Image (cartoon, rainbow, N blue to C red):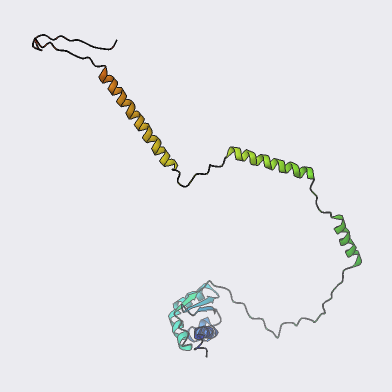
Amino acid sequence: MMTERGMVAPAAGGSVLACFDAILAAVVPELTGRARSVAFDADTGRLDVVPDAPPCGTKLRWNAPKLIVAANERVPNANVRALHVLAPVPMRASPDPVTQPAAPDVPVERRTLSDGYRRAVEAHRQAAQPSRVDPGIAAAVERQTKAMRELSRRAFPEPDVVADDAPTAIEQARVQRRRQAAATEAAALRRGHSHRSRRPVRWYDEARPPRAHVRVIDFRPG
C-alpha cells in the first residue's frame, strides 16, 4: 500500500534515520554514540549527520563511502548517495528517569482579586479622561496645511496636459532649429543679391581696342 501511494522514499528515509546507530556501530565502532543522524533527503539521497566533536566529524568524512554502502545494504529502498557532516554539537546525556525526583503534586491555587484592587482600577479608569483637541488649534493647523499646499503648488506647478498627437520637446527643438536655419539662409541670399546690385558697371568703347584704351563709366547709386 505504501508503494502504490508513493510513500516508499519517506518510509525508507525514516528507516535510515532509525538504523543509523546500528550502521555506525557496524562500520566505525569507535564512533558509537558520538554522532547522530538528523535529516535525510529522499530526492537527493543526502544524509545529514551531526558529530559531537571535530575529530569525530573528520572520521565520519573518511568513512563516508563505507557508511553509504552499509546504509543501502541495511535499507535497500533508501538509495543513500551522499553523507553530509554538519557542524559539531556536544552530545547531551539522556536523564535517568529512575533517579529523577518526581514533582510533588501541588494543587494550583487561584487567587481572586481583592476589593481594594478593583476599586483602584476603577478609580484609575475614571481619572484617565480621553484626550481632547482644542478646536482653535485644529483650525490653525488646517489653515497652515492649506497655506503650505498653496506654496508648494506655486513653487512646483503641475505640467500642462499635452495631447497625444502633440509634438514632443525634441521634435519642437528640431523644428525651431530648421526655422532658424531657413531664416539664416534667406538673410544670406538677400545680402548676396544686394552686393551684386552694387557692383560697378563697366562700358567699353567699341571704336578702340579694349587693351589700348578703356573708358570706364561707373553707375553707382548716389
Answer above or below: position of 88 versus 200. Answer: below
The x and y percentages for residue 140 are 74, 41
- On screen, residue 134 versus residue 219, left or right, reads right
Q: Nearer the viewer, residue 31 or 19?
A: 19
Quadrant hosting residue 38: bottom right
Can residue 2 be seen by looking at this rendering?
A: yes
Quadrant holding the C terminus: top left
The x and y percentages for residue 202 are 18, 13
The residue lying at 46 percent from left, 76 percent from top is 61
Q: Residue furthest bottom?
A: 1
The x and y percentages for residue 199 are 24, 16
The residue lying at 64 percent from left, 39 percent from top is 150
Can residue 63 be seen by looking at this rendering?
A: no
Q: Nearer the viewer, residue 102 or 83?
A: 83
Answer above or below: position of 86 versus 167. Answer: below
Q: Count of labels shown?
A: 0
The x and y percentages for residue 90 are 58, 74
